[in-house]
Image (tube, grey):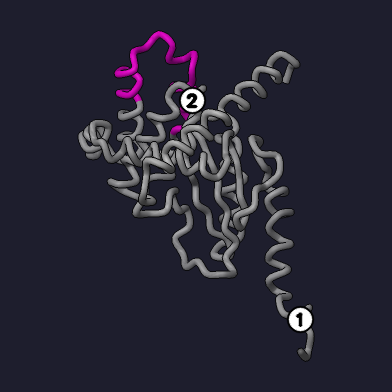
Amino acid sequence: MGTAKGTTYLLSSFFFTIILTIVYQRNVKAQSLPPAKYDGFLYTNHRVDSDTIMIEAFFDPVCPDSRDAWPPLKQAIHHYGSRVSLIVHLLPLPYHDYAFSTSRALHIVNLLNPSATFRLLESFFEYQGRFYNAQTSNKSRDAVVDEIIKLAAETVGNSYYSAIESGFNDRKTDLKTRISFKYSASRGVFGTPTFYINGFAVPDSGSAIDYKQWRSFIDPLLLAQSRKGDDLPHSL
């Protein structure tokens, strides 16, 4: 990254952090009750207990780094099976033009068919170039949203087209997408991808983590679990 680009990125991140803080503080005062459900999409559908390693990933569907971070994370989740659980939170970054609309499409599909949510996320990652900044500069917002709806329908089934289209006129899906943004702000997350393991931030936020790195984080935790009690005194 060049000096000028690096400086621009740091300034953007700094001002975005300030905006997130202001938005969050205002909404805490205005919102007296939390959402009915915990934010995020659960990737693994198995029992979660106190020994389960919980990973939280904050992604933007049109963020290239989020796209690159997904395959190794997915590989790690499949490797560990029921010992690890994953929740994906959406953080639509304001400097990615259609991050909010693609995130909203994910919430719509999750309401219609939760089993298709991650298929759509992967479609957005695969065809990210169609919705990323310069590629949409000469198109109207309605035209781009229509492309998003078409891709979503192609991914989850064309029979869902009308329902997905209607979802973009449903206030509830707008609110769900806003809640995801607010949740990220409440955790102090201002860039993607960002990861937490058992509630603690993983270093090098904003960069993809490869499979070996995931193993280096998780293997010691599972080893410590297998030895739990060994370091307890034999008598009190």
Label placed on residue 232: 1
Looking at the image, residue 192 sits to the left or right of residue 158; the answer is right
Label placed on residue 9: none
Q: Please, what is the three-letter code of the amino acid marked with disc 1?
A: Leu
User: Residue 205, how many percent across, how many down?
Assistant: 66, 39
Q: Quadrant of residue 225?
A: bottom right
Tell me, yes or no, whether the highlighted magenta stretch contains residue 57. Answer: no
Q: Secondary structure at mark 1?
A: loop
Circle 2 packing at 10 Å, graded few (<14), some (14-19), many (20+), is few
Residue under label 2, please give it. 94
Q: Please, what is the three-letter code of the amino acid marked with disc 2?
A: Pro
Q: Secondary structure at mark 2?
A: loop
Vertical placement of 105 versus 8: above or below?
below
User: Residue 213, how many percent across, how many down?
Assistant: 72, 48
Residue 205 appears anywhere in the view: yes
Residue nearest the observer in this picture, 18 or 196: 18
Looking at the image, residue 221 sits to the left or right of residue 144; the answer is right
At 35% across and 35% down in the image, what residue appears?
105
At 37% across and 54% down in the image, what residue appears?
37
Quadrant in which the C terminus is drawn: bottom right
Span colored in magenta: 124-147
Residue reaching furthest to the front: 29
Circle 1 packing at 10 Å, graded few (<14), some (14-19), many (20+), is few
Most frequent secondary structure within the magenta stretch: helix
At 47% across and 40% down in the image, what residue appears?
90
User: Residue 16, how many percent across, how many down?
Assistant: 56, 27
Residue nearest the observer in this picture, 88 or 75: 88
Vertical placement of 38 versus 204: above or below?
below
User: Residue 20, how many percent across, how many down?
Assistant: 52, 33
